[in-house]
Amino acid sequence: DTEVTQTPKHLVMGMTNKKSLKCEQHMGHRAMYWYKQKAKKPPELMFVYSYEKLSINESVPSRFSPECPNSSLLNLHLHALQPEDSALYLCASSQAGRPVGEQFFGPGTRLTVL
Amino acid sequence: KNEVEQSPQNLTAQEGEFITINCSYSVGISALHWLQQHPGGGIVSLFMLSSGKKKHGRLIATINIQEKHSSLHITASHPRDSAVYICAVWDSGGGADGLTFGKGTHLIIQP
């Protein structure tokens, strides 16, 4: 199984809502990533988890809260988002440590904040 | 932080043409990804390479570590190859520190 799954595929939320994005992989990867991609732009790294611990937080606002409950799951909790947070949110996974492993991407969640 | 430059930004070609997309980066890397993204979002990893050349079907990727340059070639291009092709690098620090992406090359293959 070389698949990374993400749910939901689409999400529309208001600025006062609380929602969560979910990501799952069963490839035994111990590094998982959240990226944000705006239209016609490359993905931007948000968070990296390595062995279920947050290793990188690229100065992301606190209204985005990541969680890695186990080695197969990655969540992104959303609260009090702004319309400019509307984007495609991509999850990815890879082998952790060195040498670096190929990164596998999920299909993304397209988020619209009203 | 690495700077990743891709060229061309946009490319339109006729079916059957040989396609070349270039990528250069500014700082030593541990590996380079070529990724494909179709409209609708999903990203597919085409190649990960740290030296030499790799081939998969009609796709060929090469990398020159000394010159900090990589190329992606598509032979006998087909309309289904139309997509955005993205070059991304792992910095030489290695480990799980995320990818640095180029801005992508938007490829259209016309029948």
Image (cartoon, coloured by chain):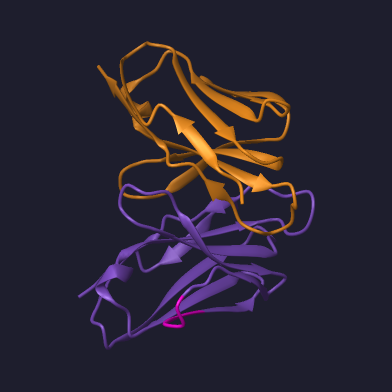
Chain colours: A purple, B orange
Question: How many marks on residues?
Answer: 0
Residue A14: quarter of image = bottom left
Of residues B97 and A109, the one drawn nearer to the viewer in this rendering: B97
Q: Position of residue B49 (x, y in %)?
A: 67, 34
Q: Is residue A103 left or right of residue A97?
A: left
Q: Residue at point 60% right, 36% down?
A: B25
Pick the quarter of the image with the C terminus of chain B: top left
Q: Is residue B50 left or right of residue A58?
A: right
Whether residue A2 appears in magenta in the rendering, the answer is no
Q: Is residue A103 left or right of residue A20?
A: right
- Residue A3 sits above or below residue A86 on the image: above
Q: Main secondary structure of the magenta part?
A: loop
Residue A3: quarter of image = bottom right
Q: Position of residue A23 (x, y in %)?
A: 50, 68
Residue B60: quarter of image = top right
Q: Residue furthest right?
A: A98
Whether residue A62 appears in magenta in the rendering, the answer is yes
Q: Residue at point 32% right, 79% down?
A: A81
- Residue B68 sits above or below residue A30 on the image: above
Q: Which residues are magenta?
A: A61-65
Q: Position of residue B65 (x, y in %)?
A: 71, 29
Q: Residue at point 79% right, 53% down?
A: A98
Q: Position of residue B66 (x, y in %)?
A: 73, 26
Q: Residue furthest left?
A: A114
Q: Residue at point 44% right, 64% down?
A: A6
